[in-house]
Amino acid sequence: MMINKRLLGMVRESKRYIAGNVILQWCSLAANIAMMTTVTYLLQELFRKKANGKTIAATAVVVLISAVVRVLCTTGASRMGYLSSKAVKKTLRERIYGKLLRLGTSYSEQVKTSEVVQVAVEGVDQLETYFGAYLPQFFYAMLAPLTLFGYLCFVNVPAAIVLLVCVPLIPVAIAAVQTWAKKLLAKYWGQYTALGDTFLENLQGLTTLKIYQADGFKNEEMNRESENFRRITMKVLTMQLNSITIMDLIAYGGAALGVIMAATQYKSGNVSLAGCLLIILLAADFFIPMRQLGSFFHIAMNGMAASEKIFRLLDLPEAERKVEKVSSDCSIVCEALHFRYDRDREILHGITMTFPKNSFTSIVGESGCGKSTVAAVLMGRNKGYSGSVRIGGTELSEIEEASLMKSITYVGHQSYLFKGTVRDNLLMGRPDAAENEMWAVLERVDLADFLRAEKGLDTPLAERVGNLSGGQRQRLALARALLHDSPVYLFDEATSNIDVESENDIMREIHALAKRKTVILISHRLANVTASDNIYVMEKGAVAESGKHEELLLQNGVYASLWNAQQSLENYGRNGEDA
C-alpha cells in the first residue's frame, strides 16, 4: 500500500535507516511487553497478598531497564528517521539539479520555473516525511500486531484472535479513502503549482503590468486562483478529518472489544488476573501503530502526489549530447531566423544578422521588438528556432552547451549575484583566478577602492546583494564577466536602471573590450551605441535597418526617429535642470 518501488530504488541509502527504525521500534515494543508483564504479575500478587520485597524489587528493576531501553530505542528511531530524511533530500535534490543541468538553459521550454522550485523544495520535503516517518511506521504497523498476537496466544488465544482480526479494519478504512484522496490530492498539487505559476509570473512582470495598467486584471486573476486553492485545501482538510475520525472509532472500538474479551475470559476462568490485566494494557498497542500509520497516510498521499511531479520532471526528454565545440573563429551569423514562444505568435520574422570576430555590433529598437529574444537564442536558452544560427561556422543546435557557455559571456540588466562574498562571486567567473587578477578586474570597473574600504575580496554580500547599490551590483557583475575572459560578450540592457556614473564606467569598459573581443550590445539608449561598427535596428520582430550611426541618421528612418526622440527628452531634461 503506497510503496513506490522506484522511489525506494532511487534512494537506496534510506533502506538501512528504515530497517534500523523498524528494529528499534520493535525493541521498544518488546521492552514494553516485558514491563507490562512484570507489572501485571506484581498487581496479581498484591491482590492475592502474596507479594514480597523480592518481587517488588525485581519488578522495579525490570521497569527501570525497560524504560531505559524504550528511551534509547525512541531516540535511535528518531535518529534513523532523520538520517533517512537527510538521504532523501540530498539524493532527490541532486537528481533534480542534475536533470536541470542536462536540460540546459532552455529547461523552461519544458517545465515552468515555479513548478521546479515547488517540486524541489516542498515536494521533496513531503517525501522527507514519507521516508522518515511513513515507511518505517508502515513496516512496524505490520510487525507489531503479529508480535503481540504471538505473545498473547500464550495468555489467552480467543482474546488474541479477536484483537488481531480487528486490526486490519484500519487499513481497510484507509484503502476505502485512498482512491478519493489520490484524486483530490492530485487536484490540490495541480492547483498549488498553478497558483505558484500565476504568482511568479505576476511578480516578475509587475513593472510591465503597472505600465500597461493591467495590474487590476491580474489582481482579479490572482484572487480567483487563490480562492480555488482555498477551496481545494478545505476539501483536503475535510477528507483528512473524516478519515481520522473513522480510524479513531475502529482503533478505540477494537481496544474496547479487547477489554471486554479480557473481562469475559477472566470471568469464565480461562485467564488469570495477571493475564486479564496484560490483555487490557496491551490491547491499545495492537491498534496504536496502525492508527499512527493512518495519521501518516495523508502525508504519504501528499508525498505520492509530489513524487509524480518529481518523476515527470526527471522523465523529461533530454536532447542528444552534442560533441561540437565552438571554434576559435567565434564569428556569429544568423540567417532567416524565426522564433515563436506560442504556436500562433511569432516573435522573430526571418531576421539576418552578422557579428564578425572582434567587432562591436549593437541591436536597438523599441521595447517588445525582439532584441532580448535574439540574445536568448544566441545563448541557447530558446532552442526552438528555425533558420540558421552559426557560431564559428558550426550550427548552434550542434554545439555542446558547456562549450557555448565558455565562448559567450552574457551580462543582463539583472545579472544574478549570490549571497556570500565578493571573492565567491568572482570565482564563479573563473574558479582558478588569482587574487591579483580579481583585483585587476575590480580596478577596471572602478570598484576596487570601495571594496578596499570594506573587507576587500571577503566583503560579504547579502541576499540579492541588498547591501550594494544598483550601480555597484552591475559593476561587480561586469567584473565577474571580465574575469571569465571569453571570445564573445553579449550585453543585454546591461546599463538599465543604474546611476549615470556607473553607466559611463560600464560603457567605457565595454568600448575598451570591443577593441579585442566580439561584443554584442543590446541597448534601449542609443547614445551608448554610436561607436558601434554596425547597428541593427529592429522593429516588430524584423530587422528594419542596419549600418553605422551616421549612416542610419542619414536614412531618416526608424533609427533616426528613435534618436531624435531620445535627444529631445535628454535635452529637455538638461534644459529643465539649467532653468
Image (spheres, rainbow, N blue to C red):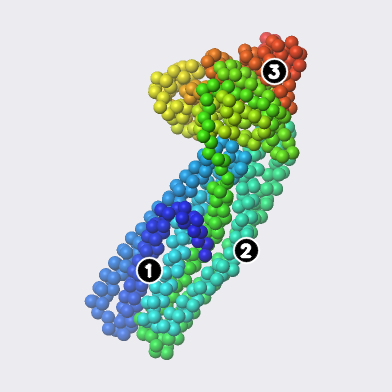
Residue 447 position, x and y percent, is 48, 19
Amino acid type of the residue that numbered disc 1 sits on in the rendered structure: Leu
Marks 1 and 3 sit apart, C-alpha to C-alpha, by 82 Å
Marks 3 and 2 sit apart, C-alpha to C-alpha, by 62 Å
Q: Is residue 485 left or right of residue 566?
A: left
Answer above or below: position of 269 versus 283: below
Residue 547 position, x and y percent, is 68, 15
Residue 452 position, x and y percent, is 42, 20
Q: Kindly state the secondary structure of the residue where label 1 is placed.
A: helix
- Total count of labels: 3
Residue neighbourhood size for the residue with mark 1, other residues' Cα within 10 Å, grouped as few (<14), some (14–19), many (≥20):
many
Q: Is residue 208 left or right of residue 505?
A: right
In terms of sequence position, does the residue under pointer 2 or pointer 1 come before the other? 1
- Return the mark for residue 29: 1
Q: In front: 384, or 280?
A: 384
Give the foreground label among 2 and 1.
2
In the image, what residue occupies the spot 36% across and 81% down?
154
In the image, what residue occupies the spot 36% across and 72% down?
33
Amino acid type of the residue that numbered disc 3 sits on in the rendered structure: Ser
Q: In front: 322, or 96?
A: 322
Labelled pair 3, 2 in contact (Cβ < 8 Å): no
| Residue bearing mark 2 | 180
Quadrant of the rendered image containing residue 552: top right
Amino acid type of the residue that numbered disc 2 sits on in the rendered structure: Trp
Q: Is residue 140 left or right of residue 51?
A: right
Answer above or below: position of 212 versus 265: above
Marks 2 and 1 sit apart, C-alpha to C-alpha, by 34 Å
| Residue bearing mark 3 | 546
Answer above or below: position of 152 versus 308: below
Quadrant of the rendered image containing residue 234: bottom right
Labelled pair 2, 1 in contact (Cβ < 8 Å): no
